[in-house]
Amino acid sequence: MTIRIYSTLSRALENLTPLTPGQVRMYVCGMTVYDLCHLGHARSMVAFDVVQRWLKHSGYQVTYVRNVTDIDDKIIRRATDNGETIRSLTDRMIQALHQDADALGIERPTLEPRATDFVPHMLKLIGQLEDKGLAYRAPSGDVNYAVRKFGGYGKLSGKSLDELHAGERVAVLDGKDDPLDFVLWKSAKPEEPQEVKWDSPFGPGRPGWHIECSAMACELLGQSFDIHGGGADLQFPHHENEIAQSEGASGQTMASIWMHNGFINVDNVKMSKSLDNFFTIRDVLKLYAPEVVRFFVVRSHYRSALNFSDAHLDDARSSLKRLYTALHAVPPSDVAIDWSNAYALRFKAAMDEDFGTPEAVAVLFELAAEINRTQSSQLSGLLKALGGVLGLLQSLPQDFLQAGSAVDETEIQAMIEARAQAKAAKNFAEADRIRKALSDMGVVLKDSAHGTQWERA
């Protein structure tokens, strides 16, 4: 069966037809590394990790590029506030990103370019846009993209220029010919650190955000490639602007298929740092095993909104235990996946239809029920193997089940400290939530003037 993928650009399911037979080239927008990754980032990383895993299992050679934005206004502000260099901050945050991703079983991308290593490629691309009349120099020293001179602008967001213009505020005196125009090159400001200033034909400065991804994708994957992905919040303006830049310069289609993963919501509101309603990956991992968090993400379709709550994570943990219990009761044989098997066929059909992980996970539970009924080690082996396609069920069953029933003292103490911090910040709802989570794990707290003691119930 052909793999079909929902493309945001066409708003329809499309057959995956790689530009080079047998090879898939995929670019996914990565993190801006000024802070720790939150669960919204985990959603995107896990979603596209599953995509590249399935493409490989389907026989494709995959070149997966996920960039790192290591120059940005937020990065400059955070480094200045911290009294450290840009490089020190970004190196530290990239290391933390890798630690979080590794914990969640996310395979490293084929290439992980840093934006600052591709400034010459960005300058070349800006020069091409200027030569074609799509970029202009502002009196401020900035170089802007002339949106109305690119005929296809708005095709990804599905909005006309007039509709987009109606949503813009009145243009300020920033040197733009049109409020929709966006910056390609930012002129250097006296107060900015020297390490974020590059020499260029346009004067000293630094690249805009959008040009970074266009340059990296084009340099590493070519002017046209198969899949471009990222979070739904990037569809406009970031990805729309990437198309304008890349296709404006080359005259070729940038990506055949555009994929966007849904948000993680808290109380039905998108989780984000700007709204201050986010939970970092490592904070959540203090309370839940990494595989539980991965399972929580994988069992929902990548395009759907995913509501975060302790109740949902608790349910994910209980559900994952059911699968591990079947593997524990009937030790799995070491088997290769027989794709003619009825369970494997349903799993494959689900994954081939826009990476349908909810249906694929349902097949895993059907297998677990059959294992419990038949005590078949072959089916147990198939369950483990199919789980492995999704990055699940590869731990020793007894280890996972014991970890779920006996929390170690280090984890308990970390949760107690997190509760104390919440109380100090007068976040009593969070303190009560942690106390309940500990109680659910069989840990009883005793507060006193001398601190908090604990004992197992």
Image (cartoon, grey):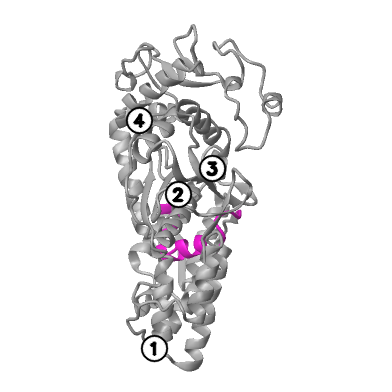
Q: Earlier in the sequence, mark 4 or mark 1?
A: 4
> Percent x, y for residue 212?
41, 30
> Percent x, y for residue 295?
48, 65
Q: Which residue is mark 1?
A: 377
| For residue 394, above or below residue 101 | below
Amino acid at pointer 1? Ser
Q: Earlier in the sequence, mark 1 or mark 3?
A: 3
Instruction: Indicate the quadrant where residue 78 lies.
Output: top left
In percent of the image, x 47 and y 66: which residue is there?
438
Magenta stretch holds residue 457: no
Amino acid at pointer 3? Ser
Tags 2 and 3 touching, CB below 8 Å: no
In percent of the image, x 40 and y 44: which residue is there?
36
Q: CA distance from mark 4 to mark 1?
A: 56 Å
Point out the frontmost of discs 4 and 2. 2
Who is closer to the viewer here, 198 or 92? Answer: 198
Who is closer to the viewer here, 201 or 277? Answer: 201
Q: Which residue is mark 3?
A: 272
Amino acid at pointer 2? Thr
Q: CA distance from mark 4 to mark 3?
A: 21 Å
Q: Earlier in the sequence, mark 1 or mark 2?
A: 2
* Mark 3 Cα-neighbour bin, 10 Å: few <14, some 14–19, many ≥20: some
Q: Which residue is mark 2?
A: 280
Q: Which residue is mark 4?
A: 82
